Image: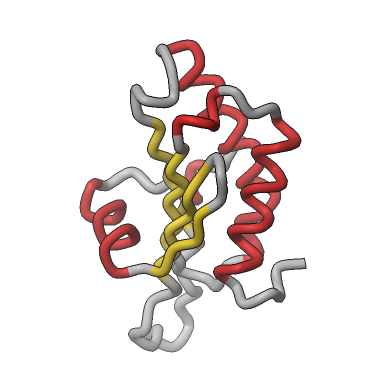
Amino acid sequence: MLPTENRLRRREDFATAVRRGRRAGRPSLVVHLRSGATDPHAPGESAPPTRAGFVVSKAVGGAVVRNKVKRRLRHLMRDRVDLFPPGSLVVVRALPGAGDADHAQLARDLDAAVERLLGGGAR
């Protein structure tokens, strides 16, 4: 499970990541990345954590399928959240093919999208 401090919850944060961030698409998902805060932090403050959110529409499938896809993506993102710069906003949007994809396929697509967004230095 993705830790609470790494979860993206506010609508404004989702909108910022999708509208102002970069994106990388794969057959089963699209990853939107808004890199870390550009404002310098005050001395003594730590950088905000990377936060990730997930969008799984009804086009993916019924409620059971959508929840399964969200659980899988949260689990996969837990191990990859440290790859992003501190303060980043990440939105993973599942495409209709994600409902039929197995765990390994989602992992491959997520890894490829993250690697593309981070300039090939994800691994």
The location of residue 14, given as percent across then percent down, is: 30, 52
The location of residue 103, given as percent across then percent down, is: 70, 31
Residue 107 lies left or right of residue 58; in this view the side is right
- Depth check, front residue: 8 or 65: 65
- Depth check, front residue: 10 or 71: 71
Q: Residue at x 21, y 54 (%)?
A: 12
Rendered image coloring scheme: secondary structure
- Depth check, front residue: 26 or 77: 26
- On screen, 78 above or below 56? below
Q: Quadrant of the N terminus?
A: top right
Q: How many marks?
A: 0
Q: Quadrant of the C terminus?
A: bottom right
Outermost residue to the left: 12
- On screen, 49 above or below 67? below
Q: Residue at x 56, y 50 (%)?
A: 26
Residue 77 lies left or right of residue 49; in this view the side is right
- On screen, 54 above or below 71? below
The location of residue 97, given as percent across then percent down, is: 52, 31
Rendered image quadrant of residue 35: bottom left
The location of residue 42, given as percent across then percent down, is: 38, 86
Residue 35 lies left or right of residue 119; in this view the side is left
Q: Residue at x 49, y 42 (%)?
A: 4
Q: Residue at x 68, y 54 (%)?
A: 111
Rendered image quadrant of residue 21: bottom left
